[in-house]
Image: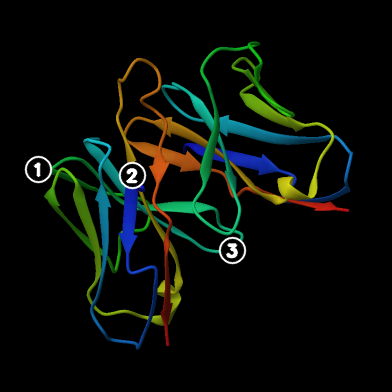
Amino acid sequence: DADVTQTPRNRITKTGKRIMLECSQTKGHDRMYWYRQDPGLGLQLIYYSFDVKDINKGEISDGYSVSRQAQAKFSLSLESAIPNQTALYFCATSDFGAGGLGDTQYFGPGTRLTVL
Amino acid sequence: EDKVVQSPLSLVVHEGDTVTLNCSYEVTNFRSLLWYKQEKKAPTFLFMLTSSGIEKKSGRLSSILDKKELFSILNITATQTGDSAVYLCAVPTGNQFYFGTGTSLTVIP
């Protein structure tokens, strides 16, 4: 079973719709992240969470919100989707401080979102 | 401003060639540098480097870090078509991971 899962894997929606992307992990990590990937722009950090009560904005948080429902779950919402939010979205986890390997991030399979 | 820059942006080689991918960084409180391989799916972890001059190897891939000159290289020898992918470099700093834009490698049979 995958350690980091994302649902849905693909989604097509219309401008103005509310969309939620979900991420679950079984790695027991405290830290979770949401990234978007656009061609030629690498991975850009949207939000990150160091534990259930800690939520932080990343580089490009405008137009997005998140919810950390539990240690294992971190959801990303687009309150009113717009076409330039069409991208590949990745969730990731990490466990800082774990004997030097803590900086490794583990990624989910990605959600391809298209906003028409 | 913290940043991570990769070069070249894209590379096309023939099978059997050796390639060198570059990653330079400017970050405060450097802790480590990570390399990932990304095909048409989520990035997969390759290496984590924390110390200068110590080469990490995995099969035909190797990587080394220079903390004085603030860069890392990823070498792939005897390239194969299965090496075609985007290679990402990332540097965690403080509360964030900074990713480069990636190098897109295409290996032609």
Pick the quarter of the image with the C terminus of chain A: bottom left
Q: How many marks?
A: 3
Between disc 3 and disc 2, whose residue precedes? 2
In this image, A112 relative to B19: left or right? left
* Up-down relation of residue A109 to residue B74 (above or below): below
Q: Which mark is residue A53?
A: 1
* Up-down relation of residue A115 to residue B15 (above or below): below
Residue on which the image places disc 2? A3
The kind of residue on which mark 2 rests is Asp
Instruction: Residue at 46% x, 40% y: name it.
Output: B98
- Residue A58 in the image, given as x and y percentages of width and height: 33, 50
Say if mark 1 contacts mark 2, CB within 8 Å: no
Q: Secondary structure at mark 1?
A: loop
Instruction: Residue at 42% x, 59% y: name it.
Output: A110
In this image, A15 relative to B48: left or right? left
Q: Read off the chain for label 1.
A: A
Q: Which mark is residue B52?
A: none
- Residue B5 in the image, given as x and y percentages of width and height: 62, 41
> Which mark's residue is nearer the viewer, 1 or 2?
2
In this image, A74 relative to B12: left or right? left
> Which mark's residue is nearer the viewer, 3 or 2?
2
* Up-down relation of residue A5 to residue B20 (above or below): below
The kind of residue on which mark 3 rests is Pro
Marks 1 and 2: same chain? yes
- Residue B46 in the image, given as x and y percentages of width and height: 57, 33
Instruction: Residue at 62% x, 14% y: name it.
Output: B68
State how far apart marks 3 and 2 are (Cα).
Answer: 26 Å
Residue on which the image places disc 3? A39
Q: Read off the chain for label 3.
A: A
State how far apart marks 1 and 2 are (Cα).
Answer: 22 Å
